[in-house]
Image (spheres, rainbow, N blue to C red):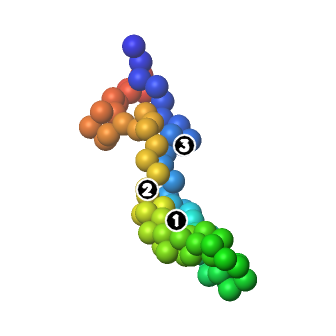
Amino acid sequence: MRPRPASLTDLPPSPADEQGARMRRYAITMGIRTLCVVAMLFTPGWWLLVPALGAVFLPYVAVVFANAVTRRRGAIESPGGVVRRDAS
C-alpha cells in the first residue's frame, strides 16, 4: 500500500497564527469580564451575584482558554517515516 501524499491542509497552523488566535480568545474573554464589572454597577439586588461571579471566574477561564493549544490529529508523518521515491 502506497503512503498518502502530504497535503498542506494536514499541517497545523503556524505559531504566529496560533498565538494570534489565543490572544483574541483572551481579549474577548477579558472584554466580557469588563462588561460584567460594568454590569455590577447597574444590577440591583441579588442579581448582582451573576455579574460578580462572572467577574471573579472569567480571568481563570480566560487563561485556560488562552493556554489551550489546538492539536489537530492528522496524518503528519515524521521525517524518518517518509519513503523516498525514485524518479525512474
Q: Are marks 1 and 2 in contact (CB under 8 Å)?
A: yes
Describe the element under mark 3 as helix, strand or loop.
helix
> Which of label 3 and label 2 is nearer to you?
2
Q: Is residue 56 above or below residue 79?
A: below
Instruction: Determine whether label 3 and label 2 are within 8 Å by CB.
Output: no
Which residue is most to the left? 80
* Residue found 39% across the figure and 13% down from its top: 1
Farthest residue, direction top: 1
C-alpha distance separating marks 3 and 2: 20 Å
- Neighbor class of circle 1 (other Cα within 10 Å; few <14, some 14-19, many 20+) is many
In this rendering, would 34 be left or right of 26? Answer: right
Name the amino acid type tagged 3.
Leu
- Dot 2 corresponds to which residue? 69
Disc ID at residue 22: 1
Q: Earlier in the sequence, mark 3 or mark 1?
A: 3
Q: CA distance from mark 1 to mark 2?
A: 8 Å
**Residue that badge 3 annotates:** 8
Q: Which of the 4 quarters of the picture holds residue 75?
A: top left
Which one is nearer the viewer's eye here, 16 or 87? 16
The residue carrying pointer 2 sits among few (fewer than 14), some (14 to 19) or many (20 or more) residues within 10 Å by Cα, namely few
- What is the secondary structure assignment of the residue under circle 2? loop
Residue at 48 percent across and 30 percent down: it is 5
Q: Is residue 77 above or below residue 42?
A: above
Q: Position of residue 56 (x, y in %)?
A: 49, 75
30 sits to left or right of 11: right
Considering the image in quadrants, where does the C terminus appear? top left
Q: How far across and down, in percent of the image, does residue 3 sit?
A: 41, 23
Which residue is rendered at x = 46% and y = 25% of the image?
A: 4
Kind of residue sitting beneath label 2? Val
Residue at 66%, 71% in the rendered image: 47
Q: Which residue is at the far front? A: 45
User: In the visual, does 45 lie left or right of 56?
Assistant: right
